[in-house]
Structures are given as structure tokens and as C-alpha cells.
Amino acid sequence: MFSSPLRAAARRLAAGLVVLWAAATAAYLALLVAPGDTVDTIVGDGADTPQIRAEIIAEWSLDRPAVVQYLDYLRRLAGGDLGRSYLLQRPVVEVIGEQLAPTLTLALAAAGLGVLLAVVLAVATAGNRRPWLRRASSGAELLLVSTPPFLIGIVLLSVLSFRFGLFPVSGDRGVGALVLPAVTLALPIAGLLAQVLRDGLDRALDEPFVLTARSRGVRERTVLLRHALRHALLPAVTLAGWLFGILLGGAVIVEQVFGRPGLGQVTLTAVTGKDMPVVLAVVTLSAAVYVAVNTIADLTYLLVDPRLRRS
Amino acid sequence: MTVTLAPATTEAHTPHPSTPPASTARRRRWRPGLLAAGAYLILLVVAAVWPAVLAPGDPLAADPLGVLEAPSAAHWLGTDHLGRDVWTRVVHGAGHSLTIGVAATAIAVTGGVLLGLLAGLTHRLADETLSRAFDAISAFPILLLALLFIAVAGPGTVSLIIAIGVATLPHHARVVRGQTLLVRRAAYVEEAVTFGLSRPRLVARHVLPNVIGPVPVLAVIGLGEAIMIAAGLSFLGMGPQPPSPEWGAMLSEGRNYLQVAWWITVLPGVAVTATVVALTVVGRHWQTRFDGRQR
């Protein structure tokens, strides 16, 4: 009985590693098939002589066979070395590290706000007590999920910043500048999470234990918050990885709308300039965090629900 | 196995108690939302196939004397910074957005069905390899995966289509694989094997028709998702380049005039939202009917 949960956990960790390796390899393959000469990208608009080209090839070891370069890439990746930016001529770890804080702040603020909003919406509308409210809320959720984040941002910006001057238009100075970007990013998340949570709540409210609680005279609010919500939160945990993807992808767009510095700007500059080490690093890192988040979610499941430890 | 539950759309094949039984769904015949969604989609297809019916003007015709005009009788949705009619551009943009969305979804669905069948029908090693590959692709946030592809292939319509198609493929593949695993154990398939049917014929005549069920619904909802991602990417300048009247690109162009002319930016955005909402409403309706029939 003791070894089986451990084995299940180990299997999940191994699966995570395999996915991670496959993701890193896929990203590297993309680099290999990229048309255009890497040397051209590195030379850019700078001086271009055969000698400089030879130096570049030697410095980036571009003359070695692709397989050797690939193995070298994996080895460095495992050691936390993400290579050097072609355009900035600096280690990618530094480039990304500098811009991590603003994006992380934005993502965490948005995630917190989104989850809070979703729980409030779901609890208020679960169980068909107020059909009109439920219908209104479903409509609003559909609208939030279907609206591109940049449109939400632009509407908020033009109404609250341009019309009423409540928030700064761009930049990342102070808490005021964080409000609109965080709300923009939080709304689509809230819309989808609320749908999943309400589904879970509805299902939990049909369970016998809710009937038992009610028959003991437990107040409806307590039934919802103490008994049903716990069960509804579990399926929502599965969405953690997806949530992370939305946050990161959304951050790229939202940072662009609000002119905020961060990983989004770094990524866009790198994509436009074909600065592959940076693009590769951002993409691989995001995959790594996704796998980590999902593995943690899976392990939490194993902890919470013993039934899953078998199989 | 890494649990990856894609949002909402995966419910296609897992009917849950909160959906009303088919009988109540049939009783409520009058559904204004569904009608409006359908009407909008028909309008959209007309705009995409034959834009001149709705907007006879030229989407690229600039008018230096009439820039940034507010919506009026002459220009329903106003004019942009070059004096181009926004309504005409929004209508002509439908073709771009729809083409990208449909083509990307076609890639995702075709690839998803083929690879899903392959994973579900071949032996364990191939299944395991393919499933891990799906997991690996899903590990990238869709937008970033598309950006990686665009960094390699350069911006443009074709890049967008392939990037979005590949990024959304694993979702379809997983659903088809799951269905295939169920169907291959069904009695009628085993019987067909007993009768000595050839493998291709077995797959084409007996497996595929029973596997394909949830796919059209997923495709409709996926189309909305694809259109939204495409708009986001062209908003970032990675899609069709100006002056092409693509919705995301229009939004991006109008952003600098937000303070004086909100209509340039907001109206193409509303077009994107309305399209996604309409597709979702139709897709979900279809899904509940499908679930009802399965029971």
C-alpha cells in the first residue's frame, strides 16, 4: 500500500520529464529548419567581412554537426544555460531575468483577481436559486471568454484612462498602472473558471453528502462554501496548466496594449529580429513551467484523492 | 500521464448532469440567442464570399479630406486615419479572418483525426510516442508556439494558418484517440475482424464513422478559438500586413488614434467578439443535441 502512491508519483514525474525533453527538442527542431543564415542574423547591420564571419562561426560553434550542437544544447539547458542572444550579445538568462519581475507581477495579480472573481460568480449562481442571475452571469461569462484580451484592454483604456483619467495610459510605475492590465488579463480567466466551477458546484450539490448536510440543518451558505466548493475546486485544479498558458500568452498581448515592459516585449522583439536563442528560451521555459504546474497539480490530486493512486 | 484538461470544449464527449435532458431542450423551441447567432454567421459568410453585397466600396480607397470622421449616414462606422470607410474594411476583413480560421481548423481537424486514429489503432509503442508528442505540443502556450513558428517562417497569412493549425491539433487528436480506443473494442468491430475485412476497409467503413461524432462540434468551437488567436497575432503585427483589412491588424492600426477615434479600433474588435460568441453559441447548442442523442 505504501509503495503504490510513490510509484504513481514517480511515474508522473517521469512523464513530465519526457514531455519536457520532447518540448525542448521540438523547439530546437524549429531552429534547425529556420530558413536564412544564422551568421547573417548575428552580423545584422554591423561590419561584414569574411574574417568577422569566421570569428562568429567559431564563437557560436556553428561549424559542428547538427547532432553535436543539439546534444550540446540539451546539456547546457539541463545546466540552466539558455545560450546567448544573437542581437543583444548577452546571456539569455540575463535578458529574461531582467524582464521577469513585471510579467510575474502582472500574471500573479491577474490570476488572483481572476480566481477570486470566478469563485464569487460561481458561488452566487450555483444551484439554480436565482435563475435570472444565473442566466445573466452565463451570458457575461460567454462574452468575457469570447472577447480577445486586447479588445478588453483597449475598451478599458479608452473609457477609464482617456475619458475619465482614472489610470495611467501606459508604463509600469506604481500600483495604479497595474490595475487595468491585471483586470484585462483576469476577465477571460474569470469567465472560463466560473463556468467550470459552477459545473462542479452543481454536480457536488447533487451528491448525497449535501443532502445529509442540509438535513442536519446546515445553512445553505455553509453547504456551498464548506462542503460543495471543496469538491468543485478539484476539477478546477486540473486547469492550472491551461491557466498558466493563458496568463503567459495573454501577458504578451496585454503588455503590448498597455506599453508595459516585460517578457512580452522581449519575446516580440526577439521574434521580429529572428533572435532565436531568446525565442527558444522563452518557449522552452514556458513549457517547463507548464509541465511543472501540471505535475504539481497531478501530485496534489494523488494526495487528495486516494482512488487515483491505483492504475 | 500528465492530465491536460482543455477548457470547456472537452465536454463534448462527457455529457454531464447539468445539461438539460433532450426533452426539455426540445420543448423550448424559441431561442432568440441561437437565431441571432445563426443570422450573424450567415451574414459573415456573405461578407466573406461576396463582400460587395454588404459594402460596395473599396476597402483601400483613402480620402484625405475625410479622415477620422465619426459614424454618420455617409460612413456608418466612420472613417479611419487615412479616410478609409471602416464599415467597408470590417466587411472586407471578414474574408481574411474566416479564411485563416477555417484553414487553420481544417489543418487541426484533418491532422487530429489522422494522428488520433493512428494512435488509437496501432500498438502501444506508437500510441505512447504520439501521445507524448501531443503532450509536448500542448505544453507550449498556443500563442507562444505560434510566435515560435512565425519567428522561423516569418510573419504572414500562411504562417498564421500553419502555426494555429499545428498548435490546436493535439486537442482534436486526443479526443479522436479516446473515441478510437472505445470503438475498437466494440462488438461490431470484432465481428468485422472475424469476417476477415481488410484493415483499411475496416477503418474506413466501421471505425471512422463512429469515431468522428464529436469532431464537427469541436471544429465549430475550435474555429472561434482560431479566429481569436489569429486576431491576437495580427494585432501583434505577425499576420497579414497593412493595408490589408484584417480585423486584428485594423485594431492595431487604429490604436494610435484611440483618443480621437475609438470606432477605428473598437468596431473590428466587436466583429471578432461577435464571431466567436456566435460560433460558441451554435457549437454548444449542437453539442447539447449531440449529447442528448448519445444517451
Image (spheres, coloured by chain):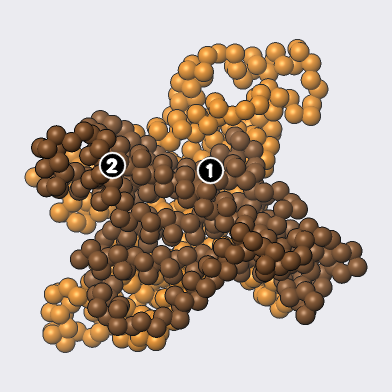
Residue placed most toward the observer, A90 or B6: B6
Verify CB contact (< 8 Å) between mark 2 and mark 1: no
Q: Is residue A62 visible?
A: yes
Q: In the figure, A165 relative to A217: above or below?
A: above
B18 left or right, relative to A145: left
**Color of chain A here?**
orange
Q: Earlier in the sequence, mark 2 or mark 1?
A: 1
Q: In the figure, B195 relative to A32: above or below?
A: below
Per the image, the residue denoted by label 1 is B163
Q: In the figure, B129 relative to A211: above or below?
A: above
Label 2 crowd (10 A; few <14 / some 14-19 / many >=20)? few
Label 1 crowd (10 A; few <14 / some 14-19 / many >=20)? many
* Residue A305 drawn at (x, y percent): 19, 56
Of tags 2 and 1, the one toward the viewer is 2
Q: Residue at x 15, y 80 (%)?
A: A211
Residue placed most toward the observer, A297 or B53: B53
* Residue B37 drawn at (x, y percent): 49, 72
What letter labels the chain drawn in brown?
B
Q: Is residue B142 visible?
A: no
- Using the image, name the chain to which the residue with label 1 belongs: B
Q: Residue at x 59, y 34 (%)?
A: B152
Per the image, the residue denoted by label 2 is B204
At label 2, the amino acid type is Ala
At label 1, the amino acid type is Ala
